[in-house]
Image (tube, helix red, strand yellow):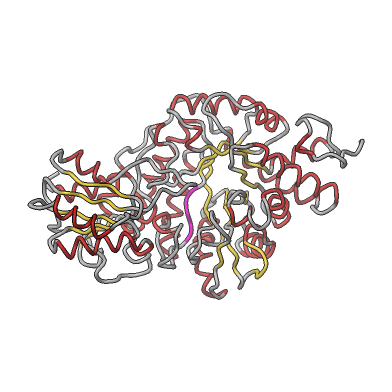
Amino acid sequence: MKSMQQQPRNHLPLDLPLDLPVDLDEAVHRCLVAGFDGTTGVPDTLKRLIERGLGGVILFTRNVRDAGQVRRLTDELRALRPDLLVAIDNEGGGIGHLVAAGAPEVPGSYALGVVDDPDLTARCADALAGHLSSLGITVSYAPVADLQYHPDNPIVRTRSFGSDPELAARHLRAWITATEARGVASCAKHFPGHGGTVTDSHHEMAVDLRSYDEIRADVEPFRAAVAAGVPMLMSAHVVYPALDPERPATLSRRILGDLLRHDLGFDGVLVSDALEMKAIADRYGEAAGARLALAAGADQVIVAVPDLATTLACRDAVIDALRDGMLAEERVREAAGRVRKLAERYAGAVGEGAVAPWDAGAGLDAARRAVRGGAAGFGDGVGAVSAGRGAYVVDLFPPPHPALNWGGEDLLSEVRALDPTAAGMVLNEAPVDPAALAEGILWWAVGVPLVVATSDAGLYPWQEELRDALVAGRGDAVVVETGLTDGGVGARSGAGALCSYGRGRVNLRALAEVLVGGV
């Protein structure tokens, strides 16, 4: 064929002949998962990518208006090619892109680990997967298999089942089995574990400096997931010098090949975390990241940004690498073969028939059982801890993560739903004058119970400062923690009166029931 080397590929029409065999061109597209914008209609560029063999799409809040709309959108996508994988992040807790589509309310994984009832975890996972099936979504990028080790970890936290590998393993097995029974593909993430870092890879490269022996414990939940038949794993944009001192796991042959494929024996689809995350984008660029990830052993790469030009650039980088011999044709065909096998297995599970009902109350049941009381936030119950009615509630939490959905829930709203006489304030950023604000709150709360809630206060000094000022002025204040009291790595005294281990709506509702009392 005529060479097109003189012109960048991303300026060419999508259907222009390329200097690759048709089946290899399709294989390249199979290795891509694309994000896009809009709730109705499929963009023309995306249609052409799907026609060329695009492996999958990933939905976000931007693609969701209501349940009927999502089902129409997934039907339209799959009408273009029946084996297209339609995926979404669906962990539960405070991360839920399908709130507007009536997603079942379940707590995050840490609360499920606190309860430690795998049957209950399976009920929650079944509810999430049943809802996905009803919407025509075939891939759930969940559960999180990371262990929450480091108290200053900013991104895993209540998304993890905990710090104990055996506990995480049994809940992963329950989650994966329940999801599989619904005909939805689960995906354990982020291999080989993001919990030992102090950096959020959405913002910069994360590094885990622990020894090989220490990191091995993080691998065990993934080993259990593989043994449970998980069809997909997602890699971490984390550098582990003990495993590979040069490249993050997503781009490392040592980690993806030697550790994952050979040691763990995983032969399913390995998908990268999103390439536009700054850990990859800032150091390598998305396009180079796509080429390097596939060469290292990934089968699919996610390009979640809605601007499809970035997806095209990644696609073109892979095609150029194949043509120039920088990427082996056999590697791309192997990857595409795994994706094709997965697509054939799960696309057939999407039918027109009614989806069996799920347990809509499982999530609230789990959240209620996860609430803990006592000075260290531990124990089998909350005892007599209660603020009573007419309380003044101060709910402090960090700004919503830009890459993770937030449904707008807060503790004050949940308390007021049970007790309309309650009042208070919600704050998710540092106040200009904490001392003045504390003085005002103490004045407003004169004569009524005071509730002070924080979320991962140890990571946000402004929360600690305001909480401590309020407690100093009101020794009878009920202190609540909606994140982790100690980073999730063991008991520590002085952590607060109540802990929900999550900020999902059901977590906050369960707290509200305890605070109001008599519900």
Residue 58, image x, y percentages: 56, 39
Q: In the image shown, does 332 or 3 lie closer to the viewer?
A: 3
Can you say which quadrant of the picture contains the N terminus?
top right
Residue 272, image x, y percentages: 61, 51
Q: Quadrant of residue 245?
A: bottom right
Q: Quadrant of residue 76?
A: top right
Instruction: Check the image and report above or below for 463 versus 96.
Output: below
Asked if the stretch drawn in magenta spans residue 490, the answer is no
Is residue 197 rendered to the left or right of residue 304?
Answer: left
Residue 498, image x, y percentages: 23, 58
Can residue 177 be seen here? yes
Residue at the limit of the structure toward the left, as seen here: 447
Can you say which quadrant of the picture contains the C terminus?
top left
Can residue 366 be seen here? no
Instruction: Check the image and report above or below for 319 versus 63.
Output: below
Which stretch did the figure color magenta? Answer: 142-146
Q: Quadrant of residue 355?
A: top left
How many marks do you count on the picture?
Answer: 0
Q: In the image shown, does 220 or 413 lie closer to the viewer?
A: 413
Residue at 40%, 67% (x, y): give it. 151
Most common secondary structure along the magenta stretch:
loop
Residue 306, image x, y percentages: 59, 37
Residue at 62%, 51% (x, y): give it. 270
Residue at 62%, 70% (x, y): give it. 243
Is residue 411 rendered to the left or right of residue 84?
Answer: left
Is residue 388 rendered to the left or right of residue 326?
Answer: left
